[in-house]
Image (tube, helix red, strand yellow):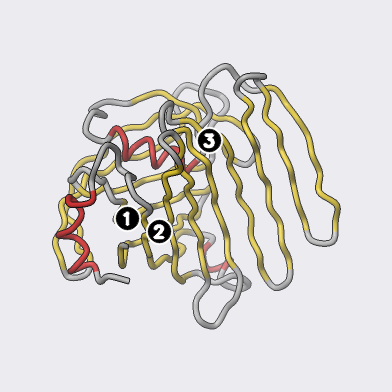
Amino acid sequence: MLAMALAFPAFTAFAADGPVSRPEELRYTWRLRGALSWIAGLKFPTSGSGLFRNNPVGNDRIESELRILGNERSEGMYVYRSEIDDLQLRTLMTFHGYEWEGRRRGEQTRFDYEDGLARVRKEREERPPRNRVHKLPANVMRDVLTGIYYLRSNADSIKAPVSSQIYSDGDVYPVIFRPIGSRTATVGGESVATSGFEIVAAPGNEKRWPGGVKVWLTADSQKIPVRIEIQRSLTSLQLELSSFR
């Protein structure tokens, strides 16, 4: 694992056609913030480490995974996983799940764009998997990880709100991607210029996404996320980059 002070000067050397041209491994520290974080801490950890892997497969697909791990005194993890169409910047498969104190739950959705169907599989410990199929809206589907990859791919051209949809917890919500300004971040003792973006519920819609995403990207061709905030109701999961490989 490279220290950030050594890894940052090499960012541009690795850049090619897109933000993820080679396998990358990003490590973070995280903590929960917000009104419900103290309640979560009674049973779940409120801080720990995170691992964000992105791996190009062929010329048209990205495998993306974000693992949220507990601290040294706890076990278990929460996982987001996506397969991303790198040409159309849409989600092919999305998965989220957790393992905690012997309990395990997960939900996977595969998007069949040709047939206009979403194929959902839910798993839970000591129960048989449940499968269902439902129709897809006509527009492109993006989950949280695909949304972050979309921002990395288009950071230089997003100057105003961009309409999209987010697939979250088995439902689809209208959202907008928009810039939120620039700032300097300190990572591994180095000052790094970043540009901020957010994914928020689109205004004027009755169906409002109860979540949100903010991400600050390095101002180079790789657009490394140095800070990620994933919001849900009154709680925010904040990840700060600690190392890059």
Nearer to us in this view, 52 or 158: 52
Q: Nearer the viewer, residue 198 or 9?
A: 9
Asked whether, in this view, residue 103 is left or right of residue 61, the answer is right
Q: In the image, is 98 to the left or to the right of 6?
A: right
Q: Earlier in the sequence, mark 2 or mark 1?
A: 1
Reply above or below: 104 against 91. Answer: below
Q: Name the residue located 44 percent from the left edge and 64 percent from the top edge.
A: 50
**Real-space Cα distance between discs 2 and 1?**
7 Å
Contact? badges 2 and 1 (CB < 8 Å) = yes
Amino acid type at circle 3 is: Trp
Instruction: Name the quadrant of the C terminus.
Output: bottom left
* Residue sitting at x 18%, y 69%: 5
Q: Which residue is mark 1?
A: 227
Instruction: Identify the secondary structure beneath mark 2.
Output: strand
Residue corresponding to mark 3: 209
Q: Residues within 10 Å of mark 2 (few under 14, many from 20)?
A: many
Residue at 53 percent across and 44 percent down: it is 82
Q: CA distance from mark 2 to mark 3?
A: 19 Å
Element type where label 1 sits in the image: strand
Residue at the farthest top position: 138
Q: Residue type at mark 2: give it.
A: Gln
Rendered view: 116 above or below 106? above
User: Which residue lies under the disc numbered 2?
Assistant: 238
Secondary structure at badge 3 equals loop
Where residue 37 is drawn, which disc sits there? none
Mark nearer the viewer, 1 or 3: 1
Instruction: Residue 67 in the image: state x and y as whole percent.
Output: 51, 60
Q: Quadrant of residue 94?
A: top right
Disc 1/disc 3 C-alpha distance (Å)? 22 Å
